[in-house]
Image: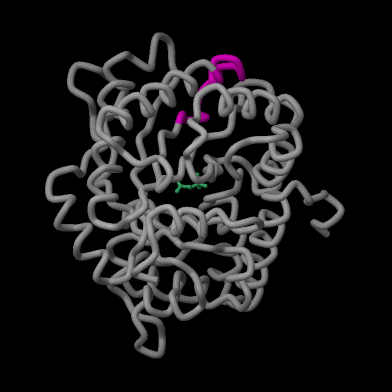
Amino acid sequence: MSSLSLEQIAKNLVAPGKGILAADESNGTMSKRLEAVNVEPSEHTRRAYRSAMFSSEGIEEYISGVILFDETIRQEMDDGTTIPDYLISKGIIPGIKVDTGAKPLSWHEGETVTEGLDGLRGRCEEYYRMGARFAKWRAVIKISGDLPSAAAISVNAHALARYAAICQEQGIVPIIEPEVLMTGPHGLDQCASITSRILKAVYSECRIQCVDLRGTILKPNMILPGSEAEKADAESVARATAEVLKETVPQEVAGVAFLSGGQSDIDATSHLNETNLTIGNAPWPLTFSFGRALLADALSLWSKSDVEGAQAKLRHRSRMNSLAAVGAWSSDLEV
Ligand code: 13P
């Protein structure tokens, strides 16, 4: 695996019918998710849950890569194999979240800048030795009143491009994730215009910083109305999402792998499927890099000690999204 080019690794991650499992919740977020299902959060329970998910039989048919958190990439499966080695043995590419979180942006109340550039080169070297071949950095853009500010767009686009350049220099494919949050009462059109703005800024910075887009994957939000606005139908979401991507994403980009962002698991799958059917001849494949939309129900079953049920749930959602990634999903398959 180590001799593959960035472009080849990126292509393998978005191969037809394959997508990414985002299991890189920080310890704080993972602890909240465990507490919500009445499990005491600890290094031990986080490892037990994630190793159970990774050993779901057959997920490698649908999952090309798994994004890990720093704690997890250092942990072991029950038999003592390191988690990255175990994933590699299954034909799954290990990835790693390398940002250190969204922090308050000075003089811009309610907005954040994602940090983690300091020491990133050294961290990438270490993660590469552990087997990671791709990484993730998530910028967070909030729509509210006059927000996002020009400052939030500019600093986050700049940081994403600097992160991408450092990863590529170290042999790691960067997943570039500028997430426009669903939170709020804004409409679909506003989500479309703000998403266009951040994507244009990101690719402008990438050009300045000599990022080779052929060895990158974009992880965007879908174009949706805010969570406090009226829901849009799948056709409208797909049309708007396809339009924004075609207008802003350079054709060299290896692939687009959406985040689920708090949508229900079926909505996320249906929107991915519909966008694939709508977009026609796009220069890049459209797939998934879901966290909650793959794992939420599985976590709930696992918390009730139903490990097999949890693994079957993850396998099912992975298969449904694999079909949606080629526009072959239908709601009849959900029963
Ligand atoms: P969700 O699919 O739960 O949004 O998580 C994806 C992710 O990696 C967010 O950074």
Name of the residue lying farthest toward the bottom? 79
Camera-nearest residue between 35 and 78 = 78
Q: How many tags in the picture?
A: 0
- Left or right: 164 in relation to 119: right
Q: Residue at x 67, y 42 (%)?
A: 272
- Report x, y in % for residue 187: 60, 17
- Left or right: 11 in relation to 3: right
Tell whether position 205 is magenta. Answer: no
Question: Above or below — where is 332 with respect to 108?
Answer: below
Q: Quadrant of the N terminus?
A: bottom left
Name of the residue lying farthest toward the top? 146
Query: Visible in this render: residue 90?
Result: yes
Q: Residue at x 51, y 54 (%)?
A: 11
- Report x, y in % for residue 219: 47, 41
Q: Which residues are magenta?
A: 180-192
Q: Residue at x 68, y 28 (%)?
A: 237
Q: Quadrant of the C terminus?
A: bottom right
- Left or right: 156 in relation to 234: left
Camera-nearest residue between 240 and 76 = 240
Q: Residue at x 43, y 44 (%)?
A: 214
- Report x, y in % for residue 97: 33, 53
- Report x, y in % for residue 328: 79, 51
Query: Visible in this render: residue 31?
Result: no
Question: Above or below — where is 275 with respect to 321?
Answer: above
How is the rendered protein coloured? one colour
Question: Above or below — where is 36 with respect to 127?
Answer: above
Q: Quadrant of residue 281?
A: top right
Q: Quadrant of residue 27?
A: bottom left
Camera-nearest residue between 202 and 2 = 2
